[in-house]
Image (spheres, helix red, strand yellow):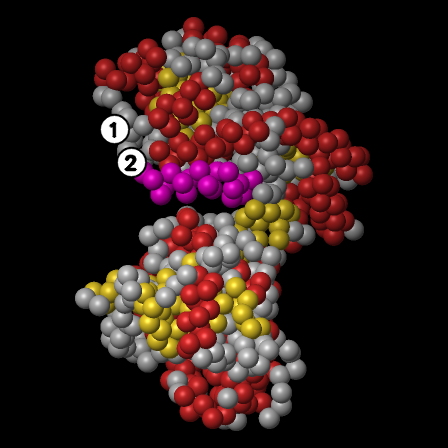
Amino acid sequence: MPSANHELYQDAILKTPSPSFAIEQVRDIASKLYGLTGNLFPLPSERDQNLRICTEAGDQFVIKIANSAENPAIIDMQLKALEHIALVDPELPVPKVLFSRNGSAIEQIEAENGTNHSMRILTYLSGASPQMTPTDRALHRPMATCLARLALALRGFFHPKANYELLWDLKHASKLRQYLPYVTDANHHELVNYFLDRFDRNVLPLIPRLRAQVVHNDFVPDNILVAENDPGRIVGIIDFGDLIHTSLINDLATTIAPMLIEQADPVRVAVEILAGYHELVPLEETELRILYDLIAARLVTLNMIAYWRATIHPYNREYITGGVDETWSLLEAWRAQNPTDVTKEFFRVCGLWELHAVNSMEKGANEPLEGHLSRRARLLGPCAYLFYDRPLHIVRGEGVWLYDNDGARYLDAYNNVSHVGHCHPHVVNAIARQARRLNISTRYVHGYILELAEQITKRMPESLSVCMFVCTGSEANDLAWRMSKLVSGNSGALITKFSYHGSTTATVQLSTETIPEVKLPSHVQTLFAPTSDSTFRKPDSGLGSAIMALGEHGHQPAMLMLDTAFASDGIYTSPEGYLNTLFAKTHAAGGLCVADEVQGGFGRLGQHFWGFQFDDAIPDIVTLGKPMGNGHPLAAVVTRPEIAETLANETGYFNTFGGNPVSCAAGLAVLEVIEKESLQQNALKVGQYLREHLAVLQRDYPVIGALHGSGLLQGIDIIKPDGAPDPEMADRIMNRMRENGVHIGTTGPNGAILKIRPPLVFQKEHAEILLVAMTKALDDILI
Ligand SMILES: Cc1ncc(COP(=O)(O)O)c(C=O)c1O
């Protein structure tokens, strides 16, 4: 048999015989060093010498005399860990350390043959060894809970020796290959290689990213004691010999693996233990992804070390290798499981549903796009259209970046909902924290809704002091429309020529992007948005004629609703005089003025926090949405108290989800990030930089017409040589840029305007990536 080429610490320990002090000698030492007297009884140990001492007072202790190869510093770590656990979670049934007369936790004693040994004394924990049968589940939950509590208790513990190299530490599983020559059965050989290959591929690269701390690392039934009269109650945790600093998840895998042996449904047992642990120590996605392979690695470890130990203690071979056959059978059964399905089950029990992310860890396990698209068409119907000629399957987002299911990264210069960046940790944490605590409707008193209302209204003109929370921009506009009709007593609506205000029955009729102007109902009439050169059609952009047209159909204006970023009209801001002129005229005709800030609000436009501030105008109602929850559905209507009062007197208003504590936590977090990260200022700065460089491109590429918009909402007209809009070219550029790794969109009455609308954490370097991708797209298409 080959010898291990990796000289490990435990190799030396296993090869060194256990100490064999005479009982009298130990009695003398205990009495002299610790003042302990009583009857001594030997206890079994493979590598140390252990004795139980029972004093006349009836107290019991364990005297542990370490193998001479044992490093006192490692014993010191184990004892300090016990003290730490007792400090943090005194209820955990771990032994207490007895200090010698010298005040030491460890004493050095010398054997007759001159070898030195570390000695310590711990309190003796009484209890029964668990007698578990494969069908007995009573201990699964208590073990999971106890392990989780141990992990929590050790979280703040550190010791300079804590990361010594221990082969039982799963992070070294790859090194088990050195013992493969001891495995003579070809099937077992292949099984070990199969799982170690998986370990190398799936686990090794992730180890540096995993949470790590000192863990027990051998929390198995052999190392616990249960109450004599209650086999489901753990009363003792007795072996801290494998304590190590390693990935936290290794500790759980180490506990789960042996519990699966001889189980008819090992996945179910694993899931049960996992669920109990996760309740106290919520696991992270990456940890769950590798749990299947870590459990296998632990099983491989059990057998490989058993073979290796058998070569060191050949006289004891039968005892040492007693359980290997059952472990091999379990490994076979484990291999027969579909790892993706097992991992999905792990995700499910932990309340995580990122199944695509799980899928993507298994090469080839992803559903091909064609299959996905036909399933989508069948299940979601024809309205669920997708962006780009080659649709994307996005599985993850971070800041300005999106990642598809093949791991490809895209710069997101289009999605405004993720206003402060995809999955901003401050927002994600705020949502998760509140979701764990409470989510409930607004029929109960809650602080967050008031805080959010205060934060929003303090950013509004003073008169707009009432906030009504809803879930979508459409609902907000629907409510604004309802209030406008009630307050004005009129029935007509005024909108721009290519507007979008929502998808409800009422707001779709306010959306000329969806219902062409000629098909609008007669109670809705249109006016002109400001144009690309930031001018408007004086004197009133067609508002007067629109009001007249309403009158011709028996309506008076109830409301003028304007998207203050004119995003669907082509992306403009209000030139001086535009809003004030229109607001004055609408008021004079009896209508209310609604600023739809669903696209332009929350600092995106750079110069101002709200779009209506570009003309220093004061609306009667402001509607908010999209970016407000950074992806969490949250929207609002902000208005004057008397307007809300009119609605309250008429019908009142209730929205089950609007303003719930989780949504408000998201909304508050978004505002905090905007403020702390100066995102409005960033929008202004990066927006200007982008505009300057787009202007350079404009000089070189005649397809680029006017540039408009503000901050991080920019429009680029794409034109034909005669200056006419060129929607086909705009579409080709957008799709080409997608191929070049940058997402933008198109908008405008002809779809001939490129729309740039990234999360506000977009920096100059991102703008540069966008410019390069756009230049390349133009060159690819034009040259
Ligand atoms: C200006 C504007 N108003 C209202 C809406 C409707 O918002 P939601 O889709 O959340 O209902 C949108 C959505 O794109 C919008 O851009």
Query: In front here: 242 or 566?
Result: 242
State the image coordinates of residue 242 (x, y, percent, origin top left).
49, 68
Residue at the top extreme, as displayed = 588
Residue 221 is drawn in which quadrant?
A: bottom left
- At 37% from the left and 77% from the top, the residue drawn is 42
Amino acid on which the number 2 mark rests in the picture = Ile
Quarter of the image containing the N terminus? bottom right
- At 53% from the left and 60% from the top, the residue drawn is 76
Above-or-below relation of 560 to 397? above
- At 59% from the left and 78% from the top, the residue drawn is 114
Above-or-below relation of 669 to 122? above
516 horizontally vs 541: left or right? left
Region of the chain picked out in magenta, as a range: 421-439
Above-or-below relation of 147 to 24? above
**SS of the residue at dot 1?**
loop
Amino acid on which the number 1 mark rests in the picture = Arg
515 horizontally vs 641: left or right? right
State the image coordinates of residue 323 (x, y, percent, origin top left).
39, 85
Give the alpha-carbon distance from disc 2 to disc 1, as whole Å. Answer: 8 Å
Q: Quickly name the residue at label 1.
A: 443
Q: Quickly name the residue at label 2.
A: 440
Label 2 crowd (10 A; few <14 / some 14-19 / many >=20):
some
Badge 2 vs badge 1, beta-carbon distance below 8 Å: yes
Prevailing secondary structure class for the magenta stretch in the rendered image: helix
